[in-house]
Amino acid sequence: MRLIPETSQLVKNACRSFSTNKLQPVTHVIFDMDGVLLDTENIHKLSVTTVAAKFGKTYNLDLRYRVLGAPELDGAKMVISELKLPLTVEEYVNMVREFEKKVMSDVDVLPGVDRFIRHLHKNNVPFAIATSSAKKSFDTKTMKHKSLFSLFHHVVNGPDVKKGKPAPDIFLACASKFPDKPPPNKCLVFEDSPNGVRGAKEAGMQVVMLPDPLLPKNLCTEATVVLESMEHFIPETFGLPPFN
């Protein structure tokens, strides 16, 4: 694990962990969406917190981090089971979606994302998205940024694969959709969740983790590199074209 300088004190305290592993050059980039490209995780946290509160329950940090990055239905089952909510999965999902659709269409991209995506596109580096979000949810979240998201070569949504994160399926499927079908070790993944990091590593890929500032240290140990923000990423450390 390598923690790039300039990270906040919160991330230093939560995820300080290092490795002497040499970073390997890559040719393709795969991005998770929520919490990596778009500032959606706080909205999702608020929506689940609101639903849980209707039944006198608390959506605690431990449960949140287990749900983070999991496919929508898997996350729903975890919340219902853990909090003993008197809801079916369908009822729970509908309540969360009803809350989120009021605000998700206006969500912003995270710092450094626009610059990096356009840099990759300008330099002909292939890049794609592997997200646990379903197609309908993806379309809502990206509505405000259609021009930017049109630059991605392709998108693999969670329901399109048999097993969701932390299984490696979605990352392997995403890599296979590039025309030149790169081997896993030539793909660099950007993730924010422990589930996503674990899946990418299982797929044989290097991972840049952009964790929640309060994520406990023991949940940040599997990534290749940990950054506070996309703004701190240095492309040439992975053999990608440097910023001008």
Image: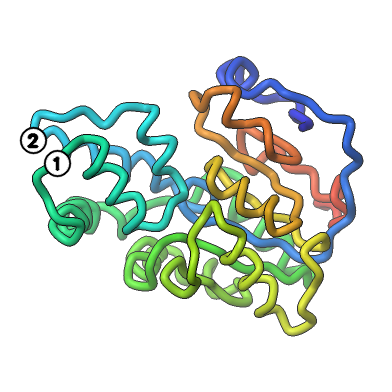
Q: Quadrant of residue 67?
A: top left
Q: Cα distance, mark 2 to mark 1?
A: 7 Å
Type of colouring: rainbow
Circle 1: residue type: Leu
Q: Position of residue 28 (x, y in %)?
A: 76, 65
Where residue 73 sits, quadrant-wise, is bottom left
Tell me, yes or no, whether the two marked residues, 2 and 1, touch with CB atoms within 8 Å. Answer: yes
Three-letter code for the amino acid on which mark 2 is drawn: Phe
| Residue at image location 21% in from the left, 52% down from the top | 96
Q: Give the image location of residue 32, x and y in percent.
A: 55, 56
**Hey, which quadrant is residue 217 in on the image?**
top right
In the displayed structure, would residue 125 be above or below residue 25?
Answer: below
Q: Estimate how packed mark 2 is, as few (under 14), some (14 to 19) or many (20 or more) residues with alpha carbons within 10 Å.
A: few
* Viewer-proximal residue among 224 and 62: 62
Q: Nearer the viewer, mark 2 or mark 1?
A: 1
* Circle 1 crowding by C-alpha within 10 Å: few under 14, some 14–19, many from 20: some
Which one is nearer the viewer's eye here, 50 or 102? 50
Q: Which residue is mark 2?
A: 55
Residue 176 drawn at (x, y percent): 69, 77
2 or 1: tag closer to the N-terminus? 2
Q: Which of the numbered marks, if any, corresponds to residue 40? A: none
Q: Quadrant of the N terminus?
A: top right
Left or right of 15 on screen, residue 205 = right
Task: Give the image location of residue 58, x and y in percent.
Answer: 21, 28
Above or below: residue 130 compared with residue 22: below
Name above or below for residue 184 compared with residue 197: below
Circle 1 residue: 85
Residue at x-position 47% and y-position 49%: 69
